[in-house]
Amino acid sequence: MEIQIQGCTITDAHALAVNNMTAFFADPTWRLTWLNPQTGHFKPLSAIIQTTTERMPWKMLQSRDRNRHTKAVSTQTGELVGYARWILPSTPTKSGDAVWPEAQVPEITDPVLRQELEDRCKNADWQPREDTHELDDELYKRNQMHKSKNDYMILDFLAVHPSHSRKGIATKLVQRGVDIARKLEADIYLLAFEQGLNVYKRLGFRMIDHMIQDDSPYGGEGKFGRYFFEMEVPKTEKQVQGLDQDQNQDQDQSQEQGQQ
């Protein structure tokens, strides 16, 4: 399938909501978030898409200094068929220069419109069930532990519409981010669902950890996995020296704090 990788704007909100929520709703464990334990019924996908459409413009405007958003668009139909959100490492963004500007969501400066978008997000009917947070909390702690080990470039979100899976779209979305990370000489980190394992392994990512959890107490199918990957990007000698200096500064600061 011929696609183009482009940056996103807030006008993509509905198309992104359709793509992302349809993709995630296909995951049996994620879908449990919208199961009503009392009735045994799921919240309709159409309602989840509508709520996401209302929330997304404001969400896309947050953390613009480091968040980057890309979409995969069919060159034949113009349909949005995939999406990736990346978080840049902190170091390259400290200079104030825009990194990967074509994937940075354009700023909205009109205060009236900004307030409207914020209110729409806050008032959206986003009410997932709360008891599954026990699964999320355990995963969150492990995820944070790994992310804190390095100033990674992070693949924070990846979704391809199920009707366009196995067409190389995910690979192209991830590869675009890998290309940017290599220019920045930044290692990459991500948390993966089982559906994405082959994509990451094929691109050269290395699994550093995994978790097996059980969703059957919440109405799920039982055991499922979540997987932690990283890619070490080659560094120039200058970059390696800079990393060593940063580590030495961190150690010096820690020693000074210990003496105070």
Image: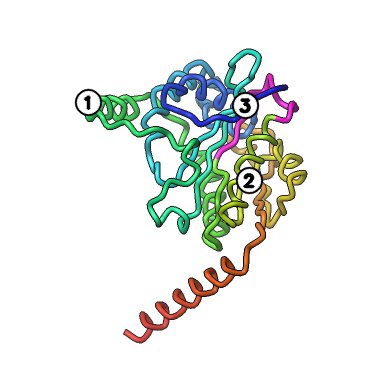
The residues bearing labels 3 and 2 have C-alpha atoms spaced at a distance of 15 Å
Query: Which residue is nearer to you in this view: 68 or 76?
Result: 76
The residues bearing labels 2 and 1 have C-alpha atoms spaced at a distance of 38 Å
Crowdedness near tag 3: few (<14), some (14–19) or many (≥20) residues, C-alpha within 10 Å: some
The residue depicted at 51 percent of the width and 31 percent of the height is 7
The amino acid marked with disc number 2 is Asp
The residues bearing labels 1 and 3 have C-alpha atoms spaced at a distance of 33 Å
The numbered disc on residue 112 is 1
In-image side of 146 versus 55 (left or right) = right
Q: Quadrant of the C terminus?
A: bottom left
The numbered disc on residue 4 is 3
Q: Residue furthest left?
A: 112
Snapshot quadrant of residue 79: top right
Does 125 sit above or below residue 237? above
The amino acid marked with disc number 1 is Val
| Residue range highlighted in magenta | 157-168
Q: Quadrant of the N terminus?
A: top right
Q: Are marks 3 and 2 in contact (CB under 8 Å)?
A: no
The residue depicted at 65 percent of the width and 57 percent of the height is 233
